[in-house]
Image (tube, rainbow, N blue to C red):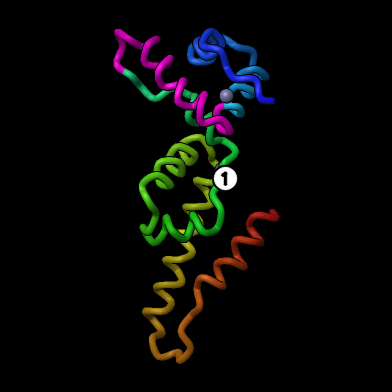
Amino acid sequence: MIEHIHSQKMRAFCSRALENAEMTEVAEHLAACPKCRRLFPEVFHEMNDHQPVSLNLSPELLFRHEHLDFDQLVSLADDNIDDEDREIVDIHLRACERCREDVRSFLEFRRQIESAINIIPAAGQPVKWAERISGWLYRLKRN
Ligand SMILES: [Zn+2]
Ligand SMILES: [Zn+2]
């Protein structure tokens, strides 16, 4: 049985008054528990009553383990990603240098492939770039 987060603890979480281990615990619970996730913005807004709401660390904490997978990279590169996914991906990218670098390398690599295709249009076989990138990305992840 999961122990839900009391609003007092949530308040401490929002003001980052908890120990690191507890911050992580709460963030992980929030990531897994829709009920507490609904409580979080309420408490957060209540606490920031007289201040403009700015993005605090918490969403990044929530999504910090959500590394981009290959499908998301492709969707992002193709600008073919739905709004909810994009939001999560954007939040994660702000927090995760590794994935930012992945996206950058991916776009760069794709640009190279695309310009190669443009320069040699009569090469016969169309380049199956998704397959090639997949192999490339696999190597990258193992480094
Ligand atoms: Zn809960
Ligand atoms: Zn990441």
Give the image quarter of residue 98. Answer: top right
Asked if 50 appears above or below 86 in the picture, the reply is above
Asked if residue 38 lies in the magenta stretch, the reply is yes
Q: Residue furthest front?
A: 1
The quadrant in which the C terminus is found is: bottom right
Position in image of residue 127 (x %, y %): 48, 80
Kindly identify the amino acid type of the residue bearing the numbered disc 1: His
Position in image of residue 42 (x %, y %): 40, 18
Which residue is rendered at x = 45% and y = 66% of the image? 110
Q: Is residue 4 left or right of residue 51?
A: right
- Quadrant containing ligand 1 reads top right
Name the residue tied to disc 1.
Answer: 67
Q: Which residues are magenta?
A: 30-52
Front residue (pair 19, 125): 19
- Count of picture labels: 1
Judged from the image, the secondary structure of the residue bearing numbered disc 1 is loop
Position in image of residue 10 (x %, y %): 52, 14
Which residue is rendered at x = 46% and y = 20% of the image? 39
Asked if 65 appears above or below 17 in the picture, the reply is below
Which residue is rendered at x = 37% and y = 79% of the image? 118
* Secondary structure mainly formed by the magenta segment: helix
Which residue is rendered at x = 56% and y = 12% of the image? 6
Mark 1 Cβ and ligand 2 under 8 Å apart: yes
Position in image of residue 119 (x %, y %): 38, 81
Asked if 42 appears above or below 128 in the picture, the reply is above
Give the image quarter of residue 111. Answer: bottom left
Front residue (pair 74, 22): 22
Asked if 19 appears above or below 103 in the picture, the reply is above
